[in-house]
Image (cartoon, helix red, strand yellow):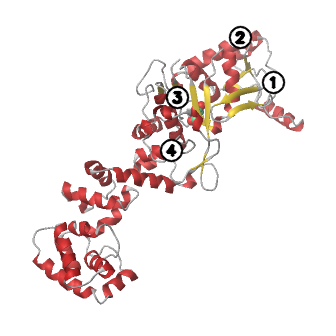
Amino acid sequence: MSVRVRFAPSPTGYLHIGGARTALYSYLFARGHGGKYILRIEDTDLERSKREFEEVQIEDLNWLGITHDEGPDVGGDFGPYRQSERTQMYIDIAWQLVKEGKAYPCFLTSTELEELAAKAESEKIAPHTYHTKYRDLDPTEAKKKIDAGEEYVIRFKNPGKTWTFKDLVRGEVTFPVDMVGDWVIIRSNGMPVYNYCCVIDDWKMEMTHVMRAEEHLNNTCRQLMLYEALGAKVPEFAHVSLLVGEDRQKLSKRHGATSVKQYRDENYLPDAINNYLCLLGWSHPEEKDIFDVRALGETFSMNRFSKSPALYDIQKLNFFNSHYLRALTGNDLVTHIEKSIHASSPFHKQTAQWKTTCCELIKEKIQLASEANTFMPLFFEKTPSEADDQLKEALAWETTPAIREYLKSELSKATGEYLSVDTVNAWMDHIKKELKIKGKPLFMGTRAVLTGQCHGPDLQILVSLTPIELLRQRV
Ligand code: GLU
């Protein structure tokens, strides 16, 4: 049977970085095993689910290159791929289960339910393990109540067993017999619940593997019962470890950006995000850190998952981003960086050649494209930053006035808009050989005079990108 793996987000918000990791793992596993990767939208929570969130989540996934073979937007043989469009099937199957004595309509009122919960508490038995008095109600009696308009839910008849399965990440997992009672599969408003729809869909859509976050582990208990009742084959499960922040708490907004959209808006590189996410709970067999996730193929195997929570560290993600940023060259580099440069910056008016040289120059100094903005004053403003003590000191060295005088005279003779790197080199040579200024006083002194800063990117290239007019104003 060929591999089929799905990612099943709920469109109740933006795609969470943890969701992106699950999607990536599912995609990589399917791709590495010649299988199909499917996107299913779990939108049975009608109040919280929004079509625009679905759209943005798909955009985010496409941006990351996690593209699906089947899904609501591309179709497929197992559709519809939105749960809200499958409601009737869920209801029909629920009544089939009722017919087979595996589920039942339950008419307990909320007061009765509260009483049951209180009783369970006073008897110190696990809550929700009760069977309700409607479990064995005669079907004709039940029908009468329904026809009379009584409110009801449909409960699954828990067969009361211990459930065990072999998780591909966590090994053997056993759920105690009293973990759940007869649980609701169809709510009183006629809407099916997640645990129920999920199984029906994974079964009907012929999923062979289900990868999802560890927080869904306990749901597997209810789901296993249902597979058995349906006579359906249980897929292989892989519950991947939790993502946590520095405080070891589940990753949330207070740890920083957690939605893929934020990273997309901040112009991160998708390859960097994929590479970093891939390593959060999985390790490369050759212990590599930097690799092309798309080229992993069969290397992406289930036996390299870690059970322990994975620490999500934005600094580390930024490091990955800087690596992938440096790997960009030419047009690709410019197109990427210029998206982050403020719209009003004169950068946008420069020639293609200037932009390329500029981006090549600063890419070594930044982790994120947006940081390129901090370098722009060097090219376009007389005073790129406020003078700090080091600059004041460099300008006050006894060798610096000679450098300034020399540069001033050379600049007054210079023609054209920009200097060439060769010219700047020749000037530096002159300062060294004729003015006899070497080492730090030469390099930092010249930099201080020409750029108004003591440190920065390669001086010769930087100066060759600065308008001669601006250099004249600085010396
Ligand atoms: N809709 C569920 C979620 O977003 C999916 C759980 C699953 O993959 O089974 O968490």
| Amino acid under disc 2 | Glu
| Amino acid under disc 4 | Leu
| Whole-percent x, y for residue 89 in the image | 57, 17
Disc 2 target residue: 100
Q: Is residue 319 above or below residue 463?
A: above
| Amino acid under disc 1 | His
The answer to which of marks 3 and 1 sits earlier in the sequence is 3
The answer to which of marks 2 and 4 sits earlier in the sequence is 2
Q: Quadrant of residue 195?
A: top right
Disc 3 target residue: 6
| Whole-percent x, y for residue 120 in the image | 85, 34
**Is residue 266 in view from this perspective?**
no
Counting other residues with Cα less than 10 Å from the Cα at mark 3, is it few (<14), some (14-19), or many (20 or more)?
many
Identity of the residue drawn at 63% across and 16% down:
232
Alpha carbons under labels 1 and 2: distance apart:
18 Å
Closer to the eye: label 3 or 2: 3
Disc 1 target residue: 131
Closer to the eye: label 3 or 1: 3
Q: Quadrant of the C terminus?
A: bottom left
Q: Is residue 286 above or below residue 456?
A: above
Closer to the eye: label 2 or 4: 4
Alpha carbons under labels 3 and 1: distance apart:
34 Å
Disc 4 target residue: 277
Counting other residues with Cα less than 10 Å from the Cα at mark 4, is it few (<14), some (14-19), or many (20 or more)?
many
Identity of the residue drawn at 77% across and 27% down:
181
